[in-house]
């Protein structure tokens, strides 16, 4: 039996053909469904992180479009948002659930999650080819080079990852952490201003601030009540 059309690479079809567009669209639909499912799987490891991956995906897509990126690129960034923490599957539950600060050994284990996530996703060619694996790998890099796993800085960090970093930080700040209560939205915005140029790409931060009220509306009135997340 021939393989389903869904798994025919768009690369073998004439560029711009209806068949190529249909196949690519169907493949991206499937990728999005799988990413949503896997994002829910990682969020389900801790009931307090409910919908964190979904929230990051939604905010990241909105920011990507607000930055003028194509809808195709915004969709890829959205999928990477769903999948950004998939590597936490490989981090011991005892580390993820540790109340308070992590020990140096636990911190090393925690910092492995972007690399573990990229390794989990690497067999999926469409995620490699669209840059989604690289976005997952780089979602804890910092604009000033102080992040992990590689200490990349500035434009060496994929733009999608720079957008996800901000969306991820925003979502985390709005939720209760093991060592502090949830931050209000205005306070989180001030932290993003403070981190522009150090943790965050200043251009992404500027676009976020211009979209802040829209983003606040997307998050819903009660999504941050008493939830916990460890980035
Ligand atoms: Fe989604
Ligand atoms: Fe993460």
Image: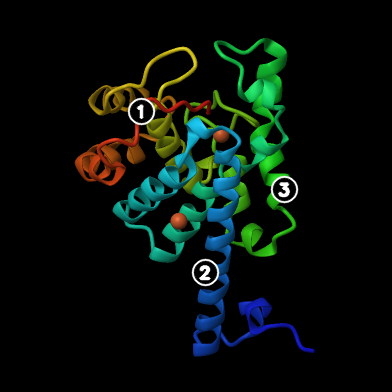
**Which quadrant of the figure contains the N terminus?**
bottom right
Task: Report whether residue 135 is seen.
Answer: no
Q: Where's residue 88, x and y in %?
A: 65, 35
**Within 10 angstroms of label 1, few (less than 14), some, or many (20 or more) residues?**
many
Q: Which residue is mark 2?
A: 29
Q: Quadrant of ligand 1?
A: bottom left
Q: Which disc, if any, is residue 120?
A: 3
- Of discs 3 and 1, which sits in the foreground? 1
- Identity of the residue drawn at 39% across and 27% down: 175
**Within 10 angstroms of label 3, few (less than 14), some, or many (20 or more) residues?**
some
Q: Which residue is mark 1?
A: 174
- Identity of the residue drawn at 54% across and 76% down: 26
- The answer to which of marks 2 and 1 sits earlier in the sequence is 2
Residue 57 versus residue 24 in the image, above or below = above
State if disc 1 and disc 3 touch (CB < 8 Å).
no
State if disc 3 and disc 2 touch (CB < 8 Å).
no
At mark 1, the secondary structure is loop
Q: Which disc, if any, is residue 149?
A: none
At mark 3, the secondary structure is helix
Work out how far the residue at label 2 is from the one at label 3, CA to CA, in angstroms: 20 Å
């Amino acid at each position: 039996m021939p393989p389903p059309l869904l798994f025919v690479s768009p690369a073998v079809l004439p560029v711009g053909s209806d068949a190529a567009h249909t196949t690519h669209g169907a493949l991206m639909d499937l990728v999005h469904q799988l990413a949503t499912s896997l994002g829910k799987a990682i969020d389900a490891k801790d009931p307090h992180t409910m919908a964190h991956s979904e929230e990051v995906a939604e905010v990241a897509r909105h920011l990507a479009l607000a930055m003028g990126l194509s809808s195709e690129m915004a969709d890829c960034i959205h999928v990477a948002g769903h999948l950004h923490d998939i590597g936490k599957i490989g981090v011991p539950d005892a580390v993820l659930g540790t109340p308070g600060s992590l020990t140096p050994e636990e911190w090393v284990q925690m910092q492995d999650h972007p690399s573990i996530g990229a390794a989990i996703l690497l067999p999926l060619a469409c995620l490699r080819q669209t840059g989604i694996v690289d976005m997952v790998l780089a979602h804890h890099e910092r604009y000033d080079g102080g992040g992990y796993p590689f200490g990349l800085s500035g434009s060496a960090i994929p733009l999608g990852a720079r957008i996800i970093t901000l969306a991820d930080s925003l979502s985390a700040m709005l939720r209760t952490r093991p060592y502090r209560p949830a931050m209000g939205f205005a306070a989180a915005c001030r932290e993003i201003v403070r981190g522009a140029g150090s943790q965050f790409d200043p251009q992404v931060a500027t676009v976020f601030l211009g979209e802040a009220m829209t983003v606040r509306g997307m998050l819903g009135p009660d999504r941050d009540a008493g939830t916990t997340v460890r980035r």
